[in-house]
Amino acid sequence: MTSFMVPAVGGRAAVLAGVLVAGSGSGFSSDLALTIVGIIGNALAFSLIFVPLWTFVKPIVNAQSVGNRTVYGHVVMMLSGAAWGLYALPDWPKTRYSVAINGICFVLQLVYVMVFIRHADGMTRWTAVVLLLVALIVTGALTWMVVVKVMLRGEWEISFIAPIASTISCVGYVAVGLDIVAVVRSEDVANMDPLLEVLLNMLNASAWVYFGYLSTPIDHYIGAPNVIGVLFLAVQLGVYVKHFRADHEPEHEEPEVAAADPDDFGTDLGLMFATPSPSSGSDIEVVIAAPA
């Protein structure tokens, strides 16, 4: 789960993608700290958006199967990117970077989901299709609300979408929990996010927890979902380490026992009629009688 944001002009924190959330109108106690956290968070999250190309798409395409992977996290991230991109849209062009990166996030997550659907089968495929359709319907509804109600008619404030996107962000970390359950049941980390990706996500979420509680007043739209994220990612890290060791524990090799070849009749007959060596000290004498 990736998360990052860019402070928009006017004090609003415009979220770029993933699970990070942000409030509006927050005052920050330290511009320098905010800038540093923003740079770190943006760099991490923008990189993490592309990581599934190698950790999710490539293994699925190579194996022509989804294995025990799940698609929930990518569907939620697609929704999250759409919601926070729409949140930043009314401030265009000041928030053009936020809108652009959220758009990239949305498109890439859509690609990841489509790849999953292409290589899944049975109920796994149909579940992914249904989730994708629901996500697209919700995205369409949010787009209509922002464009019509906020931008064209001015009937609503754009802040209405912040709690919606925050809820989506919390659900995103619940998707991490589903992946954890799948790994615990299978005791196999082969289809889990790589360790480096888990660590980067944990660092990313931690940065935005700091960002949220650096706000004055405290911005729970930023802090709360990422606190949940840090907890889930810590559990994921523990599960990964535990089952990674179990998977790579060396097995005790049994000594090989040479099995007799039942079809080697020539060797068996030769042993039956062979004359014992004099050095063997055997008293057995083999006598072959001539026919009468």
Image: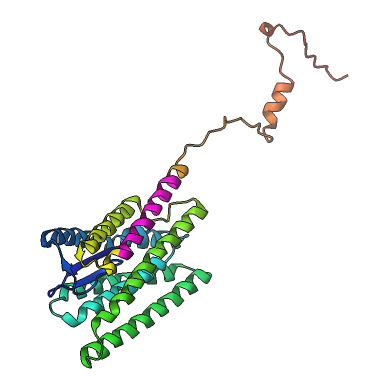
Where is residue 145 drawn, in percent x and y?
A: 29, 87
Q: Residue at x 39, y 68 (%)?
A: 171
Q: Is residue 135 above or below residue 153?
A: above
Q: Residue at x 25, y 79 (%)?
A: 159
- Residue at the far front in the pictured view: 217
Answer with left or right where residue 9 lies relative to residue 79: left
Q: Residue at x 25, y 91 (%)?
A: 155
Query: 276 and 248: which one is in front?
Result: 248
* Occupied quadrant, residue 56: bottom left
Question: Which SS does the magenta portion mostly show?
Answer: helix
Answer with left or right where residue 221 lies relative to residue 250: left
Where is residue 75 drawn, in percent x and y?
A: 38, 71
- Residue at the far bottom in the pictured view: 153
Q: Is residue 276 above or below residue 178?
A: above
Query: 136 and 226: which one is in front?
Result: 226
Q: Residue at x 80, y 14 (%)?
A: 287
Q: Is residue 129 above or below residue 259?
A: below
Residue 139 visible to an observer of this rendering: yes
* Occupied quadrant, residue 41: bottom left
Q: Which residues are magenta?
A: 224-244
Where is residue 222 drawn, in percent x and y?
A: 27, 66
The quadrant of the image that shows the C terminus is top right
The quadrant of the image that shows the N terminus is bottom left
